[in-house]
Image (cartoon, coloured by chain):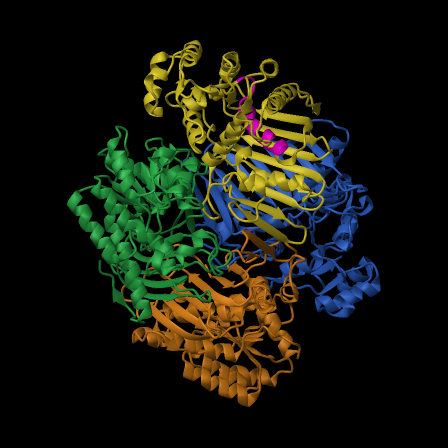
Chain colours: A yellow, B blue, C orange, D green
Amino acid sequence: MAMIGGGPGAFIGPVHRLAAELDREIELVAGVFSSDARRSKAAADVYLIDPERAYGSLDEMFTAEKARGDGIDFVSIVTPNHNHLLSAKAALAAGLPVICDKPVTASLSEARELAGVLADTGLTFCLTHTYTGYPLVREMKARIAAGELGEIRKVVVEYPQGWLSHPAEGKQAEWRVDPSRAGAGGCIGDIGTHAFSLAEFATGLKITRLLADLGAVVPGRKLDDDVSVLLRFENGARGVLLASQIELGELNGLRIRVYGDKAGIRWRQEYPNQLELLHGDGRQEIINAGTDVLGPWAASRSRTPGGHPEGYLEAFANIYRDFAALLRGDHAPLLPGIEDGLRGMAFIETAVSASAQKAGWVDLEV
Amino acid sequence: MAMIGGGPGAFIGPVHRLAAELDREIELVAGVFSSDARRSKAAADVYLIDPERAYGSLDEMFTAEKARGDGIDFVSIVTPNHNHLLSAKAALAAGLPVICDKPVTASLSEARELAGVLADTGLTFCLTHTYTGYPLVREMKARIAAGELGEIRKVVVEYPQGWLSHPAEGKQAEWRVDPSRAGAGGCIGDIGTHAFSLAEFATGLKITRLLADLGAVVPGRKLDDDVSVLLRFENGARGVLLASQIELGELNGLRIRVYGDKAGIRWRQEYPNQLELLHGDGRQEIINAGTDVLGPWAASRSRTPGGHPEGYLEAFANIYRDFAALLRGDHAPLLPGIEDGLRGMAFIETAVSASAQKAGWVDLEV
Amino acid sequence: MAMIGGGPGAFIGPVHRLAAELDREIELVAGVFSSDARRSKAAADVYLIDPERAYGSLDEMFTAEKARGDGIDFVSIVTPNHNHLLSAKAALAAGLPVICDKPVTASLSEARELAGVLADTGLTFCLTHTYTGYPLVREMKARIAAGELGEIRKVVVEYPQGWLSHPAEGKQAEWRVDPSRAGAGGCIGDIGTHAFSLAEFATGLKITRLLADLGAVVPGRKLDDDVSVLLRFENGARGVLLASQIELGELNGLRIRVYGDKAGIRWRQEYPNQLELLHGDGRQEIINAGTDVLGPWAASRSRTPGGHPEGYLEAFANIYRDFAALLRGDHAPLLPGIEDGLRGMAFIETAVSASAQKAGWVDLEV
Amino acid sequence: MAMIGGGPGAFIGPVHRLAAELDREIELVAGVFSSDARRSKAAADVYLIDPERAYGSLDEMFTAEKARGDGIDFVSIVTPNHNHLLSAKAALAAGLPVICDKPVTASLSEARELAGVLADTGLTFCLTHTYTGYPLVREMKARIAAGELGEIRKVVVEYPQGWLSHPAEGKQAEWRVDPSRAGAGGCIGDIGTHAFSLAEFATGLKITRLLADLGAVVPGRKLDDDVSVLLRFENGARGVLLASQIELGELNGLRIRVYGDKAGIRWRQEYPNQLELLHGDGRQEIINAGTDVLGPWAASRSRTPGGHPEGYLEAFANIYRDFAALLRGDHAPLLPGIEDGLRGMAFIETAVSASAQKAGWVDLEV
């Protein structure tokens, strides 16, 4: 695997590397870690790879790797959003499958362009919606699909963070609040799409209408940092999606609760190893990760027995494990792909535009 | 104290009695527990009061009690909403202060009528927004008022319940889903007002604009049973209010979180003896009820030391204790009154109407 | 009801009053709140009772009350331990039933003397092991009795507190660390007996052997403030009882966990409205107070529906409600009595003596 | 790195591999995964290593690896306990450092023999007490060392599990309950040593005396499966260590609480990303992993920011990261070594023997 992006100071680059390599099916061997060749070389030290394979440009990399007998098999894209399309197209043009951080591109039209290229090339593409990799999220999906909750009526998905409560400082914060690098959405693109994707993934239902209220709370901020969206799902279920990066003191509080006419279910990312099934009679049933009670989707993506907590990196690694399976030709039915990317971008653009225009309820069209 | 309503099968009547009498300053001695005289007498047994003082009509009660040397000093109204105004006016006409369950009346115009009568009579009136009686809610209010959170930016108040997930059965459920007895609002009147009141109480800020999305999820239901409202506060802070009675498996999950530019704070009714103060550096500080760290508002309304949990009845009793203090001429600055009732009714009617008309953002005018 | 003890500054007196009166079957009307007549009168104000019925001595009270038509029906004893026997004997001699704070007396020989008097008079006696009054403790007992856990193998009961971490200050602390008022046991008498009683109550099994390790950690302290006891139950089950008053920062953390060969169960006093049933397959089932899933023992002693937390006072009130039932001639099978008092005193004395003598395992004989 | 043990069906082998490789400083390239050469080869597939380097005996491996230019640098031992000494001695004889699963050997005398060999060879040795690798355990150690708790008075360490509640089935269970492979201790060796090590690691205090009560609860079991040990630390602090494998429904509930004369602290392995600091005034301060509030020991061994949970594998990887640092000549002051192994074995043997002889309090001598 080669990485595009993830140079010095990056958060998500090292996370992708750890996640990709966790199950030892994948190895990071090359990269364009920065568009500055010197910085790209510097990253080679951090990642412990051969400095010769830390390139200063995409062209250079694809050319050099193609020439090697042991060249790269696929590309992982972890740049800021505005470079996703360019990077992905270059990789696909080189005949390489792509795994890409979310959101898929900086705009829906870019996402459509990418979808077109993918359709033409027939190459594999995966979008790393990390949170869908948690075993108990998959268990939740399995139980909902099996009808344990009955007909779904209500979904509440919340994603509180507080780390952008003040004017941005540091590399992580800066590009996220800059429209030229993050795209039209701030918080909604950075974490709102995770919440959106989680809601559709867990329920197996598509969101068809929404009413969005985005705000830029921190003085001087150009992009949204606080998001409230009311939802309707294809089956008529009602929903609420909340995401914020100015809820001071919150860390990474993604959580979801889904209610049907037979039962309810709750999951929280910060305590990912327990899933709560709510029965109408006053009983809450806690399902523990790594135990005998799990179905195959969760069981096959756990690495430790019950009570030995797994976390964010293991969830991320499940995305890569599924991607590797797909490259091998195996079945990986839970892996998010370009379709999810298109839906996520449509969500961002529809919400941003509807909020700016105070448009009320609008259709979500991909 | 006399009670109006709270006859056989009632939930809230016995709760009011327990709460009123907990601190022994108040005693239930009379009542019109039902408009059916026989049922009213039957209630006397349950409440262990003199059956002679269980009356079949308001007139009968006020006449008889006035004639006694030890007649009632005030009235507690616990009927379904549509009887609040009538009952309150009768009590006030008899020269008696009133403590009344929420929402204050069945409509805003009724609430205004009641406010007029109160202005004319100068009598004391209290609205039992129970949850404002919890010591740690008062501590939250105190800390926000003292500036510990800085400028308030965001409020999320949620009130999930699941007990009306199916077509209503039983006395408790029936009147709540019947517009002729509950008024225009279902869930929004029953529990949405609690959430509204809690948000304004805790922050000390008034809600000035809202966007409401109410739904009737259970087939055949005439009133709303699922509520999402986006909020703006007078200082510009953003907010979200969610209330539902069809989130199957949820019990009485009222909770609030408030974020300023210095810190955040969280409280949950189901675990009422802990308040969480969120610091931006990764520390959450848990404040325990009954301990030395509390300010006077919380400390003066606790009955047990730290680790000896207090609950719903004690919170309710604090409302009555404040009411008794007010009757004695003492200061009770935290007690909800007619102003809160007017605001609550305006909230219900504005939200119901705005949702029905898909009006988008509207002003909340009292 | 008359109270003996509970004068100015007392913690447990007001708690008994609240608990006794909560269900309105009992009213505090008289008392010897202090052996100092003036202080006893002063208490009348606090308790809002007729000052004429606040007496300066037991004799005075029993004589005066006997002479009234509306004299007291029973006595509640809330003095420090060394006055329990004297007070109880006086009440019984006056023909009155007794409800008494724990531990029952200051010594096992006193407890035996009291048991003799009770046998002679045939009067009702109750020991207020408050924690056995929690609805979910009773649910736990019911489920264990019904065999849901299978054969009991292991019991861990812990009671961490931290409030005596420093040399005692204040009325509450002083008598508890003074052997002349508290008896031979400090922490073991004050809270260790609660843990002992809870373990026997919940499991329905008697403790037959123990190995005790008591320490006085705070410099200069004369009585134990930190207690570890290993246990054996009559069926051979193994157990551990830990109690401490020097675990700084702990509030009132009584908790119990019981394991059989079919399932386990856990309960914590600080979160008393949830009971956890542990299944061997990775599921934990949370049973919520006030819901439909409870058996009759728990359901009949709840006052609020699920999600409306009940607390310490309500648990305490259940003891009084059972006592009132017994006085009326009803069945109250879960009420702790003199037998529990004898066992508790035997536990204290056996543990204190075995620890002092480093006796290893000893039999617990009553 | 080469692995000894960890063949088909093993739990801990794959965990060691994941942990060792997580930070990419170490790679598993060889092993004697089983003493059966065919099974050892089979493991090569699972571990994705060159089958030529999956050997059938220690001799074969050390000879072959020595002959390679890219031969192994150290050995990881993950066999059942009775093979630790033999494996370690062979590796040390081949001049290779060793990292070894706990307990260090099957007996204290074996551990002393190993200590002697280590002293002679001067090679590096590490014992994988996994739980000391959690960042917040290291934060706890740092805060205790800095005096935040004051003088330590009390330590309670508990390790409840339930998975051996029934007669053993499966490879994992069988050797643990067989004295010929596990050594003299069952539960006390398997998890009691973890609890022992955690208590000494966190407090920085040595345990000097103990009183042990070990039981074999499951019918027919030859080794202990339920352990209670009373402790004294070198400074006089009192302690309790509980470990059990028959607490049905418990998963991997290792937890520790430490109390000083200034504050208390609590940590639980199943929720490893939060550390609770208890203040005497009613405040509990929760310290979140990955946040700014951590000291260098914790911060330098975290891989994700606050709210992105890390788990068991990451803790384990910290042990390997420290080991790698030590091999590079860096400082790794928190790494458990042979001294901890000796103390752990002394703990097991002293406790087993004292319990069997009902010896009461005994000294813990290494």
Residue A14 is covered by the magenta coloring: no
Q: Position of residue D100 (x, y in %)?
A: 30, 45
Report whether residue C349 is seen.
Answer: yes
Say whether residue C322 is left or right of residue D353.
right
What type of secondary structure mainly makes up the magenta span?
Answer: helix
Residue extending furthest left?
D120
Say whether residue A57 is left or right of residue B85.
left
The correct choice, above or below, for A279 with respect to A43 in the image is below
User: Closer to the camera, B303 or A51?
Assistant: A51
Q: Position of residue D298 (x, y in %)?
A: 34, 39
The correct choice, above or below, for B119 with respect to C336 in the image is above
Q: Which residues are magenta?
A: A183-201
Q: Which image quarter: residue B76?
A: bottom right
Quarter of the figure with the C terminus of chain B: top right
Quarter of the figure with the N terminus of chain B: bottom right
User: Closer to the camera, D294 or D338?
Assistant: D338
Q: Position of residue D205 (x, y in %)?
A: 26, 53
Q: Position of residue B125 (x, y in %)?
A: 68, 49
Residue A191 is covered by the magenta coloring: yes
Q: Which image quarter: residue C299?
A: bottom right
User: Closer to the camera, C338 or D95?
Assistant: D95
Residue at screen point 48% across, 77% down: C341
Q: Which image quarter: residue D42?
A: top left
Report whether residue C134 is seen.
Answer: no
Residue at screen point 57% across, 74% down: C335
